[in-house]
Amino acid sequence: MALCGRLVRTAASCKQHCPKFFAPPQPSSRVFSTQNANSPLTSFKLNRKAFNTQNRAFSSCRSRKNQSQVAPNARAYLDSGAIAGARNLVDVKKVLVIGSGGLSIGQAGEFDYSGSQALKALKEAGVSSVLINPNIATIQTAHVLADEVYYLPVTPEYVTYVIERERPDGIFLSFGGQTALNLGVKMDEMGIFERYGVKVLGTSIQTLRTSEDRDLFAKALKEIDIPIAESIAVSTVDEALQAAETVGYPIIVRAAYALGGLGSGFANNPEELRDLSARSLTLSPQILVEKSLKGWKEAEYEVVRDASDNCITVCNMENFDPLGVHTGDSIVVSPSQTLSDEEYHMLRTAAIKIVRHLGVVGECNVQYALQPDGLDYRVIEINARLSRSSALASKATGYPLAYTAAKIGLGHTLPELPNAVTRTTTANFEPSLDYIVTKIPRWDLGKFQNVNRSIGSSMKSVGEVMAIGRTFEESFQKAIRQVDPKYLGFQGDKFDDLDEVLKNPTDRRWLAVGQAMLHENYSVDRVHELTKIDKWFLYKLQNIVDCTHELEDIGSLFGLKKELLVKAKKLGFSDKQIAKCVHSTEEEVRARRKSFGIKPFVKKIDTLAAEFPADTNYLYTTYNATTHDVTFNDHGVVVLGSGVYRIGSSVEFDWCAVNATLSLKQLGKKTVMINYNPETYSTDFDVADKLYFEELSYERVMDIYELECASGVVVSVGGQLPQNIALQLQEKGKAKVLGTDPRDIDKAEDRHKFSQILDSIGVDQPAWKELTSFDDAHAFAETVGYPVLVRPSYVLSGAAMTVIHSEDQLKDKLLAASNVSPDHPVVITKFISGAQEIDVDAVASGGTLLVHAVSEHIENAGVHSGDASLVLPPANLTTRTLERVKEIAQKVAKAWSITGPFNMQIIQAPDPHSPEADPQLKVIECNLRASRSFPFVSKVLGTNFIDVATRVLVGRDTPAPVDLIQPPPSSSPQPDQPAPGRDYLAVKVPQFSWTRLAGADPYLGVEMASTGEMACFGKDLIEAYWTAAQSMMNFRTPVPGEGLLFGGDTGTGMLGEIVKVLKPLGFRLFAVTEEVKRHLEEKGGEGVTVEVIEFPKEDKRALREVFERYDVRGVFNLAAARASSMLDEDYVMRRNAVDFGRPLFMEPKTAMLFAQCMAAKLPKKEGEIPSEVRRWSEFIRGKPL
């Protein structure tokens, strides 16, 4: 533990004995830290001689301290007057907090967590808060934390409107990621903060600018002799080529003001640089050309500084992968394992020097490249804001960085702040860890066609996991299983060219290392030579390899002795992994392990390295221990969280898990949260009574359930992961699963059982069959008619579900992409073209429907519901349809005897036999759990569906059924008119991260591709969609007079209709083929002229010049099908619209709607605040959530 930390903590008791230590305060600095001699963990090694000298000066007061061991008291220390200038707080009454918007690659759930902490700090300080964030799925966008919420785009224009309405006197820019930081810099340049008298709290705009502008940053670091990678800032392609000649290849290009390495990459020659810099300059006005240090080690330090210049490093982290892989795509360990004491302190000292020189007030992250075999280092970059790493560091050390940074922004100093987690120290201490944390990213690149799977300087992962253990091996294997339950631990996989993947990393890098070491007999030296991963890590992995072979050599469960089983468990092996090695089952290994009395121990996150009692509910399990740190008398309810963020399961499920936990607390129940995602609010220290940072596997959940003697487990609020183990928990583990019986859940997951039940209750569904040969599939498709939807149960090519339009496509899909056989059947469903999709979210109790919400999709069926735009209350569904949908929900709730949340997708299509009859309603899917639209429907309708569900689960205060969708009888609705009711509606739109996924085709289909969502309110559909579309990241609305490019399928006539709507606005219209030009001029109305422009498909640079020359500011590309080749002009048009940062509309219904929005809203009226700028509480009339 750092002596400065000791000074702070022992101050109260030492003051009278050691008056010389209480001279006027000096900025704190870490001198050194202790380490358990046997610990494999910390690189915080001792400088013995210096330590002994200091220790002698301390001996008298230390001995007294050790006799009494009274926990230090921050309040007593403050009251002693030891700190001059404490409590000089910033005078603010109302603070505007800027959120980060929709989740995207590089900017995900960590900003919900950090923003929530900032709001918490404001609430404690009695300062009123106003939050602007269109991400409706977040925990921060509720009145529990924020006093007022605006669901609006995070743009200078809308933020200015909010400032004008709310008149805040302070603003927080550090808690909304790069979005908030860029916004702050821009608004400062526009003079808006000065005009309205808004103080920027925490780090100043000038410091933010210096940290982001590469030129200013380089100059600032030169002033204090801190080495950075030699770099030249340029703003054109030619300048970049010149700069590269000066610096010398290989080089790395970085974009200024960019998030998660967006626009950066490596170039080995002028040709590569030409393409790379052209792309980067479309994303940023300035790029940096610098010498590549690929292969050096990468380390990070999290630093906190207050306005009185107290400065500490809270956490240091080291990348498992050498430099060259973006830190967001790297495996990271904390604390660092391979740095010598000298290296550790050299970088620590430099970090503090940098943060002081730049004048950061709050939290800052410093990234270094370190020479692998010397003391040379370079600063790569700093983030003078809360970052992805700071969320990880907070969870890894138990030091609440965002909360502390917010308090510092309000004028508090570190020594006067108590540490909210440990409750026994002030915030002016450096944590010391007796455990090791491993972070592994999660990629979902397999979901995209043509995507480049290599990982480099631009981030591609969609989420990350964090595992805690007492050894690197234990922590590493836990983390692997957390990334995806299909992995058992450290393992290999088949590769065409193993050496190539080891040399040039892809998202499967660790699997390649596993393959080499476990199956191909590569030595540590050979793997190091190819990967440049530090040998320390590789020797640790070799321990896992050796133990695996030892288990395999025994080959049977009964040959497995206690000693070897203990050894394997200490190295992080799971029961399932051991079972595979000894040809047994998970259940049998579990039984044998328990018969030997081998069980995990529960430890607290002890950031005081056992020097003082750590009072925290923040727990993990380990086999490298001999005692528990906690007692198990609560008999609480276990809530299973959502695990790692991935496409299809994101912050929405964290909202559900957190709200379930808070509701249980209100009902007087003790709560136990299990989750391992460092980005989430659910893994914050004060959400549940006990937080286990642990795997969501059957083995681990049962371990915790049994230790805690829990009274029940909630599996319905964390998405699909908890659902997958529900049946096992109940049947094998005999756990009490709260809510719907897992056997009933199974009946909804199994296609056959699901179908039979729907038939038995008279609910319609599309025709489907499970088939085992191509001939059968072909016959079925011929019978029902194309198109059909195919879901192979075993997939080689990545995309699981596909809509098939012809026999040739069916052949290609079933014979080439996956092997159809009795072992691997496919489910084929009749696909209904042009149908409308309806989403139903509901809660039932004992089969009785209590509340439900009906949202309509703007896009036609065929777009995955997670990528669709949802409208609530529905704008175009008739009262009769809403009644029929409710009836279906009631029948389904009863048939499955649902207790808790559920969600259904229904399609509405005209009856082909009788066009006059009611449209057909067919159920296509039913999930007996909370869905990703639960936060959306709860916040739009002003009723917390999860709170209702939680009451139902525990059978307490169950509310009476209420209809939130249909109007009260007094308004006597007409059967085919849109349902009356509220005077507002909301639209939820998807956030895509195409820019990050080089090569991927921006096209919507039945596989989900979006990474996040936003929702905005309005008085009607036009107003709500107009606002929601602008809240998409980097969205810039085209302005009349600029160019719009059209392409795609002319068969539907939709392109012409869109032009008809846009024509009066005076846009210049372009096409790339005569066919599209003819179609637009014929169908677009009188006087429409369309210019055909050249379209170089293979030369990105030339194409960019075409976009610039014709001022193309928006692209409408309505293709009938996904591109089959990368030279397809529609693919090239879509892909480059995304790469060049132009808004892309590639789906007919939303393209038409946005055209109507532009017609209604452009040109913008100067000077007046638009009607959509209203508080959320004004829309829903109150603060019910």
Image: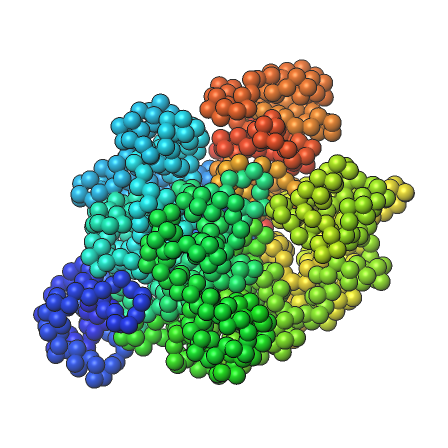
The answer to whether residue 66 of the structure is visible from this angle is yes
Residue 668 position (above or below residue 161): below
- At a point 33% along the width and 34% down the height, the residue shown is 250
The answer to whether residue 163 of the structure is visible from this angle is no
- Residue 806 is situated, as x and y percent measured from the top left of the image, at 77, 37
Residue 689 position (above or below residue 771): below
Residue 823 is left or right of residue 869, and the answer is: right
What colour-coding does the image apply?
Answer: rainbow
- At a point 17% along the width and 43% down the height, the residue shown is 225
Residue 26 position (above or below residue 1088): below
- Residue 590 is situated, as x and y percent measured from the top left of the image, at 55, 76
Among the 4 quarters of the image, the one containing residue 1180: bottom right
Residue 487 is left or right of residue 301, and the answer is: right
Instruction: Quarter of the image for the C terminus: give it.
Output: bottom right
- At a point 26% along the width and 36% down the height, the residue shown is 230
- At a point 21% along the width and 49% down the height, the residue shown is 374
The front one of 710 and 114 is 710
Instruction: Quarter of the image for the N terminus: give it.
Output: bottom left
The front one of 31 and 750 is 750
Residue 623 is left or right of residue 883, and the answer is: left
The front one of 1184 and 228 is 228
- Residue 1147 is situated, as x and y percent measured from the top left of the image, at 65, 36
- Residue 469 is situated, as x and y percent measured from the top left of the image, at 40, 68
